[in-house]
Amino acid sequence: MKRPFFFRTLTFGIAASALTLASCSTTETRISGHPEIYQTLSSRDQALVSQGQIRAGMSQNAVWLAWGSPDRKIVGNMRGRPSETWIYVNYTTYPYPYPYPYYGRGFGYGFGFTSVGFVGSHHHHGGRSFVFFGDPFFDPFYYSYIPPSIPYPTKTVTFANGRVVSFQYLVPPYR
């Protein structure tokens, strides 16, 4: 009875993993998947796109081939004309020591102090007594050792009339 459930769950997990991995796109996969777009580019733009680079004056299709789909799109107005900015996001980790609520090992909020002023408590267990110093509500699974992941914009490109008018490469906030 449990075996079919296990195999269905395993099959679902493998299928979900395959879908996730297949959705990762690279410059090469975008070019091979859309050769008709790539062939319409000039030889100069084809060389840039193949290296994952862009230039001012490129079309949106060329930028999509080089950089992929943006994480955010912002529609605006530049000098009285419609514009569109694509933002590409990457992730970094916050440098140690982590800010609230990532405290590290063992003592919760610190050495016996909490936000409610709790310092310690006296407990009896099995004929023995002990004093607990620290936060009684400390949860080691909540206060994880996994550093927080922080999104930041990596690249932006702005289009007017379907052509690149500006682009930027941005530096990660924490190095």
Image: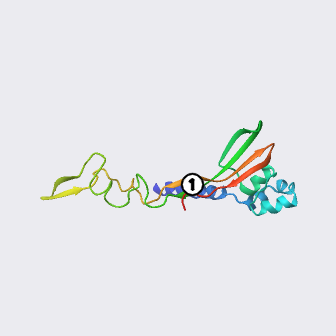
Q: Nearer the viewer, residue 56 or 40?
A: 56
Q: Residue at x 63, y 59 (%)?
A: 21
Q: Quadrant of residue 104?
A: bottom left
- Residue count near mark 1 (Cα–Cα under 10 Å), binned few <14, some 14–19, many ≥20: few
Q: Indicate the position of residue 90 as horizontal and vertical percent values.
A: 60, 55
Q: Horizontal and vertical percent for residue 37?
A: 83, 53
The percent coordinates of residue 16 (x first, y second) are 59, 55
Report whether 142 appears left or right of 158: left
Judge by depth and name the residue closer to the eye, 72 or 82. Answer: 82
Report the side of 91 relative to 139 (left or right): right
- Residue 70 percent location from the top left of the image: 68, 50
Residue, disc 1: 12
- Give the residue type that dot 1 points to: Phe
In the picture, the quarter occupied by the C terminus is: bottom right
Quadrant location of residue 29? Answer: bottom right
**SS for tag 1?**
helix
